[in-house]
Image (cartoon, rainbow, N blue to C red):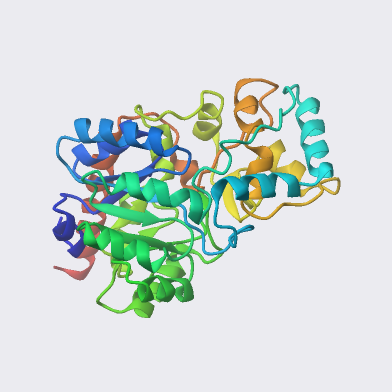
Amino acid sequence: MRTRVTELFGIEYPIFAFSHCRDVVAAVSRAGGMGVLGALYFSPEELELELKWIDEHAGGKPYGVDVVMPAKYEGADLGDADELLGRLQGMIPAEHRTFLEDLLAEHGVEPSTGTAGRALLGWTDQTARPQVEVALKHPIALLANALGPPPADVVAQAHEHGVKVAGLASNARHARKQADVGVDIIVAQGTEAGGHTGDVSTMVLIPEVVDAVGAETIVLAAGGIGRGRQMAAGLALGAEGVWTGSIWLTVDEADTPERALPKLLGATSRDTVRSRAWTGKPARFLKTAWTEAWESERSPGYLPMPMQFMLVADALPRIARSGDGELVTFPVGQIVGSMNQVKPAAQVVYDLIEEYVEAVDRLNAITGT
């Protein structure tokens, strides 16, 4: 396949695979797409080890790194990460801590210890910048920002290192803001997507974004894309590639928690919900007792980012390890309804391309070309 994005990065297929698992990132890059490592949960020291491993296992193929530098969050005016952590910890209301501990106890999960020292990793400008510094010391091809336009100085810094920059946008206005700070690629992400996402559907969003940013800026289609037919639709709407995430949660190489995997494999496209129950900003997850509890009348409500995640961070791994399993949730998009078997990552890439070709051939037959 040949689009501007394949030419830009020297990749065989315009398929970008977001994953927090280094094995998935390397496997997709080796298969001809581009793996993009989510840096959010890694300390700078851990990220260094992850990227060194990818350098050694990607076969010389290009890969990217995704950070989270939100434009708006609680404590954005504080310059020191340690001060920010301490200040925000003290701002978490006691009623929220009590609600969480009661919820865990109801489902047989040991109570949260309240230790959220790692909870702030990557969620703020102050804590994401060290991740950017680490990433740019490696031969990455792409730096992506997942929440809002990246700071202009970070865009400039990446460009100085010869690294292209991508930004995720959930509406045309956000896409224009991304273009204004100089990003090279806009990821137009529809509401079907997993994780942080807006409320405009992919089918509507992609052409709006393409028209909003003009021909100079490359657009990738995202949100509910996990089949070759959906990939063909994205390119037909004006995108030059696809950004995928959820479909890599159920590949052989993925490190998806053992308790979450069966839920993902058995879920339908109606088993997800947009909720603030994980980070404080709307994100799509599996619908479980966890999301329902935070939406219930007894819920104290959500805290702003990053305080909501600071509150629940210690509880999430405990939920994954113990209890009755009803609280286990996971960020995933509506494409989860098609994710019903475990395959190698390379096979998922090839299946996408095979079905894409079939879809294009069918359209060509209709038009007689």
Q: Nearer the viewer, residue 96 or 45?
A: 45
Residue 263 drawn at (x, y percent): 56, 31
Q: Is residue 227 left or right of residue 69?
A: left
Residue 19 drawn at (x, y percent): 39, 41
Say above or below: 347 vs 176.
above
- Total marks drawn? 0
Q: Quadrant of residue 106?
A: top right
Work out which quarter of the rendered image holds the C terminus and state it: bottom left
Work out which quarter of the rendered image holds the N terminus and state it: bottom left
Residue 363 drawn at (x, y percent): 24, 63
Residue at the image position 58 percent from the left and 45 percent from the top? 82
Q: Is residue 27 left or right of residue 179?
A: left
Whether residue 320 appears in this view of the structure is yes
Residue at the image position 22 percent from the left and 35 percent from the top? 55
Q: Is residue 254 left or right of residue 85?
A: left
Residue 264 drawn at (x, y percent): 52, 34
Residue at the image position 76 percent from the left and 41 percent from the top? 293
Whether residue 186 appears in this view of the structure is no
Q: Nearer the viewer, residue 272 or 169?
A: 169
Say above or below: 57 vs 211.
above
Q: Nearer the viewer, residue 263 or 5?
A: 5
Q: Quadrant of residue 63?
A: top left
Residue at the image position 49 percent from the left and 32 percent from the top? 265
